[in-house]
Image (spheres, coloured by chain):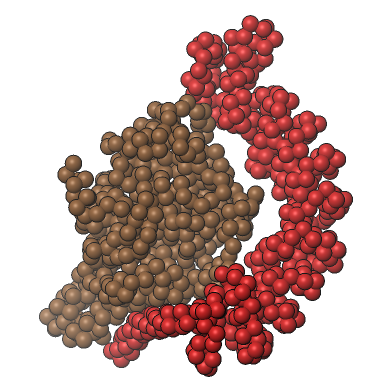
Amino acid sequence: MTQLYTIGLLALVLSVFGLIAYMLVRRIVLELLEWDRQRRLAQWSIPLTRWLEGESEIPPEEIQLLSSRRDLKIMAAICMGQLRTGDERIRARLVQWLQDHGFVTHWIEQVGGRSRWERARAVETLGVLRALEAESTLVSALQDPVFDVRIRAAKALGSLGGQQARRALVMALGDESRWSVIRIADILAQMGPHIVTDLVEAFPVIGSGSRIAALDIIIRLADNSHLPFLRSCLAAPDSEIRARAVAGLGRLGDASTLPGLLDALQDLAWPVRAKAAKALGELGLADAVPALTASLADKEWWVRSNAAEALRKLGRPGIDALVNSLSSSDLFCRDQAFAVLQSSGDLHTRLMGLVAKNAQERARAQAVAQALIRYQSRHCMLDVCNSLADQDVRSVLYVMLQQHPEVTEVAV
Amino acid sequence: MFSGLSDNMNPDLVAFVIGFDHFIVFYFIVINLGLLALFGSSVRSLWQFVQGSFNADYAQIRNSDLTLPISLLVPAYNEEATITYTVHSLLRANYGEFEIVVINDGSRDNTLSVLIDAFKMERRSEPVKLQLKSKPIRAIYRSSLNPNLVVIDKENGGKADALNAGLNLSRYPLFGSIDADSIIEDGALLRLVKPFIEYPEETIAAGGIVRVANGCVINDGHVEQVRLPASRLAVMQVVEYLRAFLAGRAGWSAARSLLIISGAFGLFRKREVIEVGGYSDATDTEDAEIVVRLHRRMCEQGRKYRIVFVPDPVCWTEVPETLRVLTVQRSRWHRGLLQTLWLNRGMLFRRRYGSVGLIGMPWYVMFELLAPVIEVLGFVAIPLAWMLGILDHVHMFLFIFVAFFLGALLSVGALALEEMTFQRYARWQDLLRLMVYGFVENIGFRQYLTLIKVKALVDAIWSRREWGEMQRRGFGVTNSQASKLRES
């Protein structure tokens, strides 16, 4: 037993101090590396900058004597910093020198190297250099097993532009990593509207994951000439594609999209319905009022919320529909209508009719008040009363409320 | 191991002491094996998390139309020293659509007037849907500077009551409960909402990590430099928090048995919380109780659900720097644990409640709730056995050393996890102090906490409840300013 305890204790002590040693050594190594990097950066950046800016004709000695990996890494960092300044004169000088001295070839070779960090750095450097001779190497780097290398290669190809780079990036939208796809999509979107044609052409042949990303980019950059393509996407079996197509159609704001959007409001997938409701609000056509009113009772919060907002955006007919929904038998429907009318101030406007001279207007306001009294809690109603600026309207509403002692404290 | 007995000793007493010591050793082995397994599970889940979120694009989440909006509920009771910092930090939450609902729970200090002045709050009469019962609301204020900031002024009813009032006024389908003495780090909401986006149908609650703000340099509701506090008691709590979150909750979350989401920083789906009747004031720890009730409800309805811990959204909070306040706080926590477990005792060892009923709850009962009692009995029994000559001094000291180093291993292990993942304490002196305190907290501090917990259990049995008041220094306030504040 003693031996067991002693062995256990020794193992514990070793584990504890092993962990401590690990933490200390890790910190020390990281800090030393950082300190040395900073020191060299400071030492080299001034002469290098002078040469790049043309103050000196001969490159500094340090740049000609690069040998170790670390030196190369630090020098690359300085070069990258200089290249990112965007000064074309500096870029031309540096790129020329790097090509003359075989660095570009060296980095192209490194893209096929064993170290993932070296590959990532080489790819990034080639991108910053915009080295056209590296285009096919960068395209092959899009298949690299390491995520970081693939992303940097995509960025590099984005900076190169060109037909081959564009096609490769479109196909890379099928990358297994979701985050990688998002970044590639951003890179493609930054390449300008002409990328839409490439994407539409490639759409039938790329995988389902790529299609969603491609559609995102198309929506961002599309114009009315792409309406037929977006309409065709409404029939896609994938609900994410349908949802995006709906959002795209709403964004384009063309009246001819109304039937498609109304159909989408009945879709089985809630994101499609939610997007359709929002799109109909953006479209601004009163024909959508009945369908949006029905969507106020949707079982999904987002659909209800978007439908209520959309109705408000449709103006008078939409607001009328919301007011009518205050007495709906559906709790969700009433709640959404109440929330939107309250926040937009339309509820107060309608209640002001309680003291109107016009009998019809007064009757409408009374109907609103009755609906509120019937379905909202006493507490809530008292708050509505108190928030009314007009004393007369408030008094009328108070009296109506007094006539209904059955109004519960807690809304059910 | 147990030897050297005197002939003239009562054999029954000797048999009892030996039996009890064997029980202590067995209990000690089981609890520590469990803790080591939990630590291993935490390491695995943290490593997976870091790998999976290294390239996470949170801007995508922020900009997406389908990211759910959030209501942040901040119950405040006598929080005049910290409330503006908290609200400032929340206003900078770097999130798409959100609202902040501060609930002034009948504060006796100037919490309300501080808020009115700082954020130009205007009295409004807004409708409140009373889905959950709460004490009467006196007034509602909305900020003219930030329309998404609302303050509810209500009669005092406790934290659970305040949260229910906030839930009634809140508009959005997700809500976060945030302590009024806490600071939410920039981007923390985006990180915390990620599970709700990844598994929208299943995720019903997510909790972030709570870190100690004492000692940090805080400016305008933003933690600018992470530093260790000067107070020894607070540093020990830093180690304790790291151990509890990184080496504990990460593991429980992986085992789908997370029973606690800290009240300081959690995100919930409103529909499910309203379904279970909102927060309850039946316990002293409403945050743990609501999570257990959610587990219970979901399991009873046979619904697929997730309640998860996310290790990188950070909430900074002040911890007690005096023993008195710490005692009251920990007593409350342990009393709350007892009440929560008692209220949900029907879940214990029931297959219907899955891993929560079979692993989580039994562990919390045997090794969280009752551990202090057994530890205290161990403090007595082991030396007693030695004094009676039943246990020789070699074994006794070996046992003590093993216990000490096991505690240190878990603390230092948590520090190593912190170093490998988030590395918040960048200064050398902080790292070294943390290492030292990884050992020091095992001598005295943990035993003191054990005693507090035993007392809390006794209090709970005698139905003595005391919430206690945390002495707030206020974020971004120096020591001298703090003493002036106290004098005034």
Image side of residue A187 versus residue A345, left or right = right
Count the labels in the image.
0
Residue in the foreground of this view, choosing between A404 and B61: B61
Residue B437 position, x and y percent, is 27, 72
**Residue B272 in sight from this viewpoint:** no
**Rendering colour (chain A):** red
**Front-lying residue, B267 or A62:** A62
Can residue B101 be seen at all in this image of the molecule?
Answer: yes
Q: Give coordinates of residue B169: x percent, y percent.
A: 50, 35
Return the x and y of residue A122 as percentages of the image width and height. 62, 82
Front-most of A251 and B393? Answer: A251
Q: Residue visible at 30% across and 91% down?
A: A3
Q: Residue at x 76, y 61 (%)?
A: A214
Q: Is residue A178 above or below residue A137?
A: above
In the image, residue B474 sits, relative to residue A94, either above or below, namely above
Q: Position of residue A318 (x, y in %)?
A: 72, 28
Quadrant assignment, res A144: bottom right
Q: Which residue is at 22% across, 75% downward?
A: B382
Residue A26 versus residue A309 in the image, above or below: below
Q: Chain in brown?
A: B
Q: Residue furthest left?
A: B8
Residue A290: quadrant of the picture? top right
Quarter of the figure with the C terminus of chain A: top right
Instruction: Determine the residue positioned at 66% across, 35% down.
Output: A309
